[in-house]
Image (cartoon, rainbow, N blue to C red):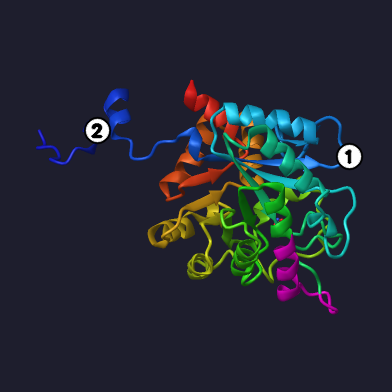
Amino acid sequence: MIDGPRDRPRRLRRTPAIRRLMAETRLHPAELILPMFVREGLDAPEAISSMPGVSHHSIDGLRRAVTEAAEAGIGGVMLFGIPVSKDATGSGATDDNGILNLATRAVIEEVGESIVVQTDLCLDEFTDHGHCGVLDAEGNVDNDASLERYRDMAIAQANAGSHLLGLSGMMDGQVAVVRDALDDNGFIDTAVLGYAAKYASAFYGPFREAVQSSLQGDRRSYQLDPANRREGLREILADVDEGADVVMVKPAMSYLDVLADAAATSPVPVWAYQVSGEYSMIEAAAANGWIDRRRAIEESVLSIRRAGADAVLTYWAVELAEWLRS
Ligand code: PBG
């Protein structure tokens, strides 16, 4: 007979009741945010083949889908717009009648009281070259000229009623420029989310199809190198310093170390974006019967929360919220 260990962690894993009591992290619908796509010129939803279960919406379809999202009790929606025509400066982004600004007005009217309506503030869906900013004479992304576009885009989105602007372009100084522009124009209550640590990731692949991206080349001159952890924290601190109300790490699952660093340091909420590739990998594996879909979804989002995210952007937000409530 051996003496047996004195330390028996299994004691706290014995029954469902004890496991429930001991859980360190829990999911709740209020901390889930659904990214949604609205496309100009549609009159019915159109499935996105690279993201099974996700669709492009018309403005009317979007109204219905956000109502459903609000009823599911999730915390917010993040809107992306896909215009019919694109140009070098992304003029659709700053047009009050551009698809994203029109959709924002519609959504605010529909559910503006019950859910936080957020808008993507970046030029890539609106530019014909597909970059997140405007280009200089040599074809490089011009940081400071892009900031001028972001400033105008911020005013247009705030005017449309967006509660929170999601700055995803990764230009240096973007949070400060947008914060100043909002304050100067009386939008002191419009919040700013800095996509502070956004990495140049292969996991955006399905999204690029979703937004019909016209990108040539890549975004490595502005998005972070996946090799760098310290630099992620530097970007987080810079956005906090510039006045971000919330900061974000993106993608989520391959960057949980960066997320944990941010969560340990940031004085403002830290969110994470579970991106299209993370979504589609699980969907594809589940469709093949290789993993248990529901367990994989729950575990993936739980792990992002455990690493330190206060809220998670995920394409499963509504479905997950419904599971959590049932
Ligand atoms: C850029 C943007 C991207 C995503 C959201 N906003 C990616 C990119 O750099 O192309 C990715 C979201 C996803 O993959 O789900 N405005």
For disc 1, the neighbor class at 10 Å (few under 14, some 14 to 19, many from 20) is few
Mark 1 and mark 2 in contact (Cβ < 8 Å)? no
The secondary element bearing badge 1 is classed as loop
User: Is 145 included in the stretch rendered in magenta?
Assistant: yes
Spot occupied by residue 312 in the image (x, y as percentages of width and height): 53, 44
Q: Which residue is mark 1?
A: 41
Q: Nearer the viewer, mark 2 or mark 1?
A: 1
Nearer to the camera, 171 or 202:
171
Query: For residue 26, what is the image quadrant?
Result: top left
Name the residue located 82 percent from the left edge and 63 percent from the top edge: 216
Q: Which residue is mark 2?
A: 12
For the residue marked with disc 2, what is the amino acid? Leu
Query: Relative to 25, does residue 265 appear above or below in the rendering?
Result: below
**Which quarter of the rendering shows the N terminus?**
top left
The span picked out in magenta is 136-152
User: Is 304 included in the stretch rendered in magenta?
Assistant: no
Nearer to the camera, 83 or 98:
98
Please indicate, yes or no, whether residue 33 appears anywhere in the rendered image. yes
Nearer to the camera, 91 or 207:
91
Spot occupied by residue 176 in the image (x, y as percentages of width and height): 59, 69
Distance from disc 2 to disc 1, alpha carbons, whole Å, reads 56 Å
